[in-house]
Image: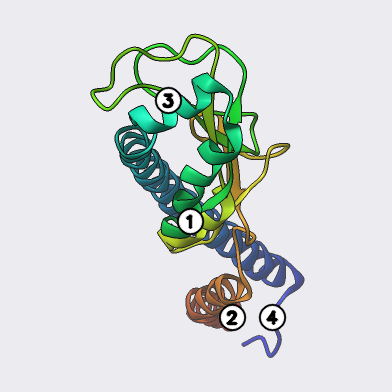
Amino acid sequence: MKSRISGRDLIKIIVALVGIAVISFAVTIAVKVSNRNSQFKAAGSAFATVLKIDSMAFNDGYFSWTSLQENVASGDLVTAREQLLDISFLYPFILEVSLENKAPPGGEPLIESDGERLFMRFSIKDDYGNKPLPDWRGVVEIDSQALLDALRSENRLHVDARNGKELAYSLKADFADPLLTWSDHLIVLLATLAIGFPLSVGISRKSRF
């Protein structure tokens, strides 16, 4: 009967432990990636839906307003801007509301992003949503990060124009935290020990008989 584990059996144990660790890591990563992909897709859908609803509310409530249209057309931009101040007070995710002497979007409000900043652009119409001014448009800049935080994704998302992927309307985002946390590494270690210990005992027994 051998009293010690042979070098060959020791190599077998080490290889087995490494294999178990690699498999455990691979499974953990696959599960985390799948979970994050589902979260990202759900967050993007919710984000786009909120923006669409808000843009229609702004369009109907503020930019289809005869009084605003008349003030802009007559050049009374001070009064026109005062009329739009309510949006910032009523909606917490607005950075700025402005009027631009540029061609308006045709049809529905335009939502677009440069990858980091997010804008809604509106034509300025009468109370019935008709007769848009040809050379003026309203612009609402949204605080995209604040809106993302309000969605309360399980894993926090942050706007990342450089390394992120498209979330909605060309806005790019990524997860703020690393894929694997210390608890994931601990789980892999425990799984490796739980599976590897009885395996090493079995190899050790065979080496003694």
Query: Residue flagged by tag 3: what amino acid is it?
Result: Gln
Quadrant in the picture for residue 53? top left
**Real-space CA distance between mark 1 and mark 4, rounded to the nearest whole angstrom:** 38 Å
| Marks 1, 4: nearer the viewer | 1
Q: Gap between marks 3 and 4, in whole Å?
A: 89 Å
Q: Amino acid at mark 2?
A: Ser
Q: Earlier in the sequence, mark 3 or mark 4?
A: 4
Mark carried by residue 204: 2
Q: Residue at x 69, y 38 (%)?
A: 161
| Mark 3 neighbour density, 10 Å: few (under 14) some (14–19) many (20 or more) | many
Specify the farthest residue to the right. 7
Residue 159 or residue 164, whichever sits in front: 159
Instruction: Report the quarter where the N terminus lies.
Output: bottom right
Drawn side of residue 67 relative to residue 24, left or right? left
Query: Residue tagged by mark 3?
Result: 69
Taking depth in this image into account, of 139 and 155 the one nearest to the observer is 139
